[in-house]
Image (cartoon, rainbow, N blue to C red):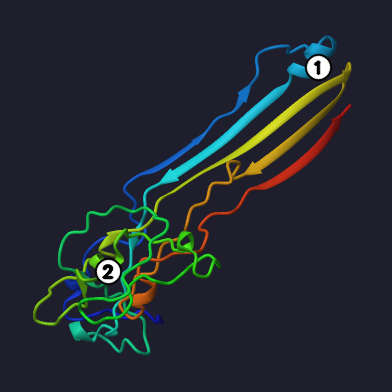
């Protein structure tokens, strides 16, 4: 009934760890502010400065566990058929990662790896071929992090950390609704509104690639994880 197989049906503790939806911090807030001045909207000044409403929505959160894929299809733990089914085996960090979960610009990567794995994290992203500023990576030194990572080994490792050994990228976004009610005459009024999604046009990158089968893309990212600014305008007449 599912294409997801356990790494080892006889010892599920080998997969014990953080779940994919685990987040340490999530912040959401919604504010509606009606300006208190010129509510009666008398005169030109009252009509221009009165009747405004501002409603921001702010969301932010830390990253979820980041899967670090291996090249052994779960067989190091004696698991299922990882070639025809999907397993969730994660790579092993031989030392604690302390680099944080941020993006860094202009990361050229490691062109010659001492361990003989080829170029590490050198993929140029963002469509700017050859431009250093186009190389965006989660690690300041992709080669150094790569050398602390290896596949899980049967008989040596007893756990591979669940959904991921390190945290992915966080996010922050603010949407904003602005409304202006204009009293034209007695019961007749107009209300103009603007809805701004991602009003600051802030860029949040999606999680980088972490897989031992693609050393060149190690830690690199180019995909926008949120939506670019969008604006919806409206006008309503009341009478």
In the rendered image, the vertical position of residue 8 relative to residue 235, given as above or below: below
Mark 2 vs 1: CB contact within 8 A: no
Q: Is residue 4 left or right of residue 155?
A: right
What is the C-alpha distance between the residues marked 2 and 1? Answer: 62 Å
Which residue does the image show at 20% across and 79% down from the upper left?
115
Residue 168 in the figure: left or right of residue 156: right
Q: Secondary structure at mark 1?
A: helix
Please indicate, yes or no, whether residue 88 appears anywhere in the rendered image: yes
Q: Looking at the figure, which quarter contains the N terminus?
A: bottom left
- Mark 2 burial class by Cα count in 10 Å: few <14, some 14-19, many 20+: many
Judge by depth and name the residue closer to the eye, 139 or 181: 139
Q: Position of residue 81 (x, y in %)?
A: 30, 89
At x 29% / y 52%, what residue is drawn?
Answer: 100
Pinpoint residue 206: horizontal percent, then vertical percent. Answer: 46, 60
Say which quarter of the image contains residue 227. Answer: bottom right
Residue for point 79% across, 12% down:
45
Q: Give the label on residue 143, or none.
A: 2
The quarter of the displayed image where residue 3 is located: bottom left
- Residue 188 vs 69, above or below: the answer is above
Residue visible at 19% across and 68% down in the picture: 148
How far across and how far down the image is residue 207, in percent? 41, 62
10 Å crowding of disc 1: few (<14), some (14-19), many (20+): some
Q: Nearer the viewer, residue 87 or 225?
A: 225
Quadrant occupied by the C terminus: top right
Secondary element at tag 2: helix
Residue for badge 1: 47
Numbered circle sitting on residue 100? none
């Amino acid at each position: 009934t599912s294409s997801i197989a356990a790494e080892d049906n006889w010892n599920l503790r080998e997969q014990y760890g953080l779940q994919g939806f685990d987040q340490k911090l999530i912040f959401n807030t919604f504010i509606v502010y009606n300006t208190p001045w010129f509510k009666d909207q008398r005169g030109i000044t009252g009509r221009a400065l009165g009747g405004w409403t501002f409603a921001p929505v702010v969301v932010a959160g830390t990253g979820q566990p980041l899967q670090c894929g291996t090249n052994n299809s779960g067989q190091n733990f004696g698991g299922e058929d990882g070639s025809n089914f999907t397993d969730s085996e994660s790579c092993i960090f031989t030392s604690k990662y302390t680099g944080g979960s941020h993006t860094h610009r202009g990361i050229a990567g490691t062109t010659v790896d001492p361990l003989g794995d080829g170029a590490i994290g050198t993929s140029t992203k963002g469509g700017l071929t050859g431009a250093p500023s186009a190389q965006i990576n989660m690690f300041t030194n992709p080669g150094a992090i790569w050398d602390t990572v290896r596949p899980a080994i049967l008989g040596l490792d007893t756990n591979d950390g669940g959904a991921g050994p390190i945290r992915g990228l966080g996010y922050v976004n603010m949407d904003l609704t602005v409304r202006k009610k204009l009293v034209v005459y007695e019961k007749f009024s107009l209300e103009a509104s603007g809805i701004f999604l991602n009003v600051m046009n802030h860029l949040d990158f999606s999680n980088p690639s972490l897989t031992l089968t693609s050393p060149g893309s190690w830690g690199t990212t180019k995909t926008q994880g949120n939506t670019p600014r969008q604006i919806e305008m409206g006008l309503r007449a009341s009478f």
